[in-house]
């Protein structure tokens, strides 16, 4: 049995849940493969912390899959258990730090969304350099981009940033899922043309 | 849900990625339900929403978003007595409202299978308490099934209908938010033939006329049925003993916590302890537990909340003469969600087995950082009328966050999207408990503390849920209070179900039976009632001020549709009729030169579309309206005391207007 865990974090309204859904739908091809993972959804409101987990399991054979000792179904990722972390908001990357180990790959978006406590002058938003140095204490594999700016520049909208981030994930991490499987999920979904473009864009960053 | 709508058409051999809630709904569909209802509540809402959305593709399926849980469960009972398999869903606290029908259900029994799916919310990310509804069953005798993953969510639901019919109990299917919102692979089964779903109510006075000596008889009957069910559960497929090691330690768990436990064992590299997985957490058979206890010296119960299983297991241990020790809450917290991490740490402590290095390191790092990071809380959507409502209220009562003035008006909160008004920067609630507590508690406070004015808030959906008698009570008893109904036409927080206020559906179709809220309020005997647009903040604020001066019960209806629904409808109308879109554009902008950073828009109103930008030239910061997120509600434009925000309009003839005045020069 092999596991591969991806934690995706960010804010309500950034398309976090969609990223998880795309990655999960790309894993329906084999019978010896399982995927699940919970989504933390607030209400319909914006700007709250949102996280979603994508947990792939690959079984050696049917016997292993059917053994209750090996058939894993926790919807959560444990501390230090993520192979990859994607964060669409810099500060939230640090809230996702608990999922990292020394081999984890981290991809994060540099565009900050200022929480209300910072607006009110009660706290300070951390510098990107602080975020990076904290992450570096855990793993060396850190990649960050201004994904908001890239999405705005290429698509004239922020809506593509989540799929761009998935492209980056495939470029930087060794994901045990076929890239083409993700592409066919995107091709069958809403806004296929832009999503495929965004994915390709991320792949080349 | 996947492309070819497997939710409706899928059959054995198909699989798809579905949400736990959808899996429950699919299980009910496979079992041949003809009735599905709920009062929406996170985390359970999608259970009925997905059935409602698909009902036009499903023969003989009735769905209902009932006005409250009490009505909803009664509806399911009526359907069951008519021979229709019925599914009712609600969130944990919904059972408080539906506790009355739940109390009677064991007495009267069911005809066709009835399943009550409950979404519990440990850690309370979307609730006002952590209530574990399983305790209700100690007196309602409703059997409880707890699926541990997405596949079981479907399979258990399907089977629950058979068990319900066989033992004549309504079955509770418990799913915590972690399962409701777990998305993963589901393997489908076949759907029962739906052609013959037809109601036929057969009179059954002995069971259904539940009073006097008949009630006492029914009481005895269900205690008997409960014993039969216990017997059935000794060998049933729902409870499993895993016994492949030599250890004298046993673990008992159920539901998602069982899933955490199995993964925790794998992460800790522990494979030899005896395990009991309870698919039914009520009732529990003494015989089953006795068999599990065999050869064990120590037993640990791994579960959430106050220990419903532990309570039962300890009683059974006493009754069966178990000599070993039983643990539980010493290792797993009574409060908050029990996460995978908590199970790993608890098991590691109990077995005195070291934690994996990477786990330990990451957990410590998280702890060290979490105090240092600015907290983040959700807020109203951009352009949400609730933001304007709170802003208006705070202005009317003379409160400001910028100068930290005290607010002596008491503001009573209630349940809905507007509950977010209790968070900074508004801090505009003084208490918040359950549905419609605002006005009822507020009425008494205004009665006993005459030095303070009281404003009670309520949303339209919450008002219709159980607020009408509360308002009538305030009128009847001569209360002195201002009641503001935030009528945004939808049960927005749970995914936009309709309320009696919904005028137009998202496709533009007018709703049938729309209620005139103002007339309703008047008919209850309120003479001071006004309906106005909260986005006209100055007018609204002045109205609140003058209402507070009047005696008696005053009602203001803040009437404006949820911005998300308005945007969605406009989008779909544009799509169908491109001409509608050709009406020109407008935008709001902050003129850097005039803005003095007084913070009226940035902190007091706190619209998230107004952001801080770095000035490349000076290195300083300035306020900026992000045109990609601004929805042009115009509220900031109205409130800026320095006229620094302007409205720029341009139509297709490239005519420009600034603040309503035409410009000569075209750009
Ligand atoms: S209200 Fe006007 S002056 Fe005050 S910060 Fe906003 S734009 Fe600037
Ligand atoms: S007009 Fe002003 S208040 Fe309204 S959405 Fe735009 S920035 Fe926010």
Image (spheres, helix red, strand yellow):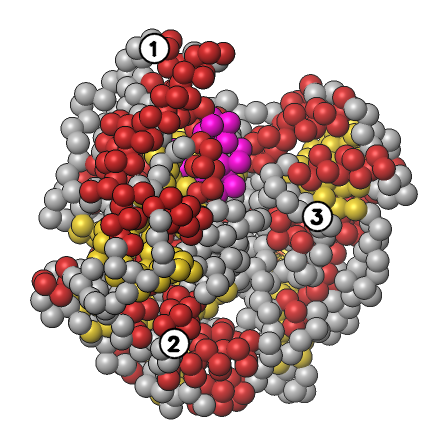
Closest to the camera, between mark 2 and mark 1, is: 2
Nearer the N terminus, badge 2 or badge 1? Answer: 1
Residue B312 included in the magenta stretch of the image: no
Residue drawn at x 62%, y 48% is: B418
Mark 2 and mark 1 in contact? Answer it, CB < 8 Å. Answer: no
Q: Quadrant of residue A7?
A: bottom left
Does B256 appear above or below B519?
below
Q: Residue at x 72, y 61 (%)?
A: B604
SS category of the residue bearing label 2 = loop
> Disc 3 sits on a residue from what chain?
B
Q: Is residue A200 above or below residue A188?
A: below
Circle nearer the viewer, 3 or 1: 1
* Alpha carbons under labels 2 and 1: distance apart: 58 Å
Q: Is residue B524 left or right of residue B498?
A: right
Q: Chain of mark 1?
A: B
Residue A29 falls left or right of residue B432: left
Q: What stretch of residues is rendered in magenta?
A: B84-103
Q: Where in the figure is residue B210, as x and y percent of width and height?
A: 45, 15
User: In the drawing, what numbered circle is on residue B352?
Assistant: 2
Residue shown at the point (35%, 52%) measured from the top left: B322
Say which mark, if any, is on residue B29: none
Marks 3 and 2, how far apart at CA: 44 Å
- Same subunit, labels 3 and 2: the answer reads yes
Name the mark on residue B431: 3
Q: Secondary structure at mark 3?
A: loop
Task: Residue B89: say if magenta.
Answer: yes
């Amino acid at each position: 049995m092999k596991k591969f865990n991806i934690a995706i974090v960010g804010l309500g309204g950034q398309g976090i849940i969609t990223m998880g859904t795309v990655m999960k739908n790309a894993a329906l091809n084999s019978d010896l493969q399982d995927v699940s993972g919970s989504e933390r959804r607030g209400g319909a409101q914006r700007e709250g912390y949102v996280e979603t987990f994508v947990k792939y399991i690959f079984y050696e054979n049917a016997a292993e899959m059917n053994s209750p000792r090996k058939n894993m179904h926790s919807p959560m990722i444990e501390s230090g258990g993520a192979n990859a972390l994607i964060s669409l908001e810099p500060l939230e990357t640090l809230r996702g730090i608990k999922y990292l180990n020394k081999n984890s790959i981290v991809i994060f978006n540099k565009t900050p969304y200022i929480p209300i406590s910072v607006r009110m002058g009660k706290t300070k938003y951390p510098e990107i350099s602080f975020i990076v140095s904290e992450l570096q204490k855990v793993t060396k594999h850190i990649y960050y981009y201004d994904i908001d700016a890239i999405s705005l520049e290429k698509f004239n909208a922020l809506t593509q940033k989540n799929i761009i981030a998935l492209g980056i994930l495939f470029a930087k991490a060794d994901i045990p899922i076929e890239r083409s499987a993700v592409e066919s999920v995107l091709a069958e979904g809403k806004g296929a043309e832009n999503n495929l473009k965004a994915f390709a864009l991320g792949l080349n960053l | 849900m996947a492309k070819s709508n497997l939710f409706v058409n899928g059959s054995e051999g198909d699989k798809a990625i579905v949400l736990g809630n959808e899996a429950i709904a699919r299980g009910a569909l496979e079992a041949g339900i003809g009735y599905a209802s709920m009062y929406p509540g996170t985390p359970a809402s999608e259970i009925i929403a997905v059935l409602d959305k698909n009902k036009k593709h499903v023969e003989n399926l009735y769905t209902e978003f009932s006005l409250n849980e009490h009505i909803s469960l009664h509806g399911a009972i009526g359907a069951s007595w008519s021979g229709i398999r019925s599914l009712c869903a609600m969130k944990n606290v919904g059972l408080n409202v539906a506790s009355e029908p739940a109390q009677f259900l064991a007495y009267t029994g069911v005809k066709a299978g009835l399943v009550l799916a409950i979404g519990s919310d440990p850690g309370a990310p979307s609730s006002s308490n952590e209530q574990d509804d399983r305790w209700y069953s100690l007196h309602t005798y409703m059997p409880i099934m707890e699926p541990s993953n997405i596949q079981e969510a479907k399979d258990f639901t399907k089977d629950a209908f058979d068990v319900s019919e066989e033992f004549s109990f309504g079955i509770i299917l418990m799913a915590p938010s972690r399962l409701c919102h777990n998305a993963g692979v589901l393997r489908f089964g076949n759907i029962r033939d739906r052609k013959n779903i037809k109601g036929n109510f057969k009179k059954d006075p002995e069971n259904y006329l539940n009073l006097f000596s008949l009630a006492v008889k029914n009481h005895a009957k269900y205690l008997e049925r409960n014993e039969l069910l216990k017997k059935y559960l000794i060998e049933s497929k729902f409870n499993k003993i895993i016994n492949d090691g030599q250890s004298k330690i046993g673990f008992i768990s159920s539901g998602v916590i069982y899933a955490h436990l199995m993964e925790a064992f794998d992460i800790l590299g522990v494979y030899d302890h005896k395990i009991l997985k309870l698919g039914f957490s009520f009732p529990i058979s003494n015989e089953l537990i006795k068999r599990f206890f065999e050869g064990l010296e120590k037993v640990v119960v791994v579960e959430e909340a106050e220990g419903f299983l532990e309570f039962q297991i300890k009683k059974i241990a006493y009754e069966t003469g178990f000599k070993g020790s039983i643990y539980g809450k010493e290792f797993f917290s009574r409060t908050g969600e029990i996460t995978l991490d908590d199970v790993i740490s608890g098991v590691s402590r109990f077995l005195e087995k070291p934690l994996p290095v990477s786990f330990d390191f990451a957990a410590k790092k998280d702890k060290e950082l979490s105090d240092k990071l600015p907290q983040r809380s959700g807020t109203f959507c951009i352009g949400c009328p609730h933001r304007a409502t709170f802003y208006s209220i705070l202005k009317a009562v003379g409160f400001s966050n910028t100068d930290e003035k005290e607010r002596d008006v008491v503001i009573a909160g209630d349940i809905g999207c507007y509950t977010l008004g209790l968070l900074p920067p508004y801090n505009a609630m003084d208490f918040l408990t359950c549905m419609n507590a605002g006005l009822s508690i507020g009425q008494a406070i205004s009665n006993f503390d005459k030095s303070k004015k009281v404003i009670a808030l309520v949303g339209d959906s919450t008002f219709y849920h159980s607020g009408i008698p509360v308002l009538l009570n305030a009128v009847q008893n001569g209360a002195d209070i201002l009641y503001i109904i935030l009528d945004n036409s939808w049960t927005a927080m749970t995914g936009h179900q309709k309320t009696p206020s919904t005028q137009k559906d998202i496709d533009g179709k007018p709703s049938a039976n729309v209620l005139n809220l103002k007339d309703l309020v008047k008919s209850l005997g309120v003479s001071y009632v006004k309906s106005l647009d909260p986005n006209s903040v100055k007018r609204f604020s002045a109205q609140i001020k003058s209402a507070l001066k009047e005696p008696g019960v005053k009602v203001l209806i803040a009437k404006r549709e949820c911005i998300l629904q308005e945007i969605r409808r406009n989008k779909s109308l544009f799509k169908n009729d491109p001409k509608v879109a050709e009406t020109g554009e407008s935008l709001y902008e902050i003129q850097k030169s005039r803005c003095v950073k007084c913070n009226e828009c940035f902190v007091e109103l706190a619209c998230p579309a107004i952001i801080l930008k770095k000035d490349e030239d000076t290195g300083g910061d300035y306020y900026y309206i992000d045109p990609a997120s601004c929805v042009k509600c115009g509220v900031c434009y109205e409130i800026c005391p320095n006229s620094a925000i302007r409205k720029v309009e341009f139509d297709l003839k490239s005519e420009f207007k600034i603040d309503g005045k035409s410009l000569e020069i075209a750009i």
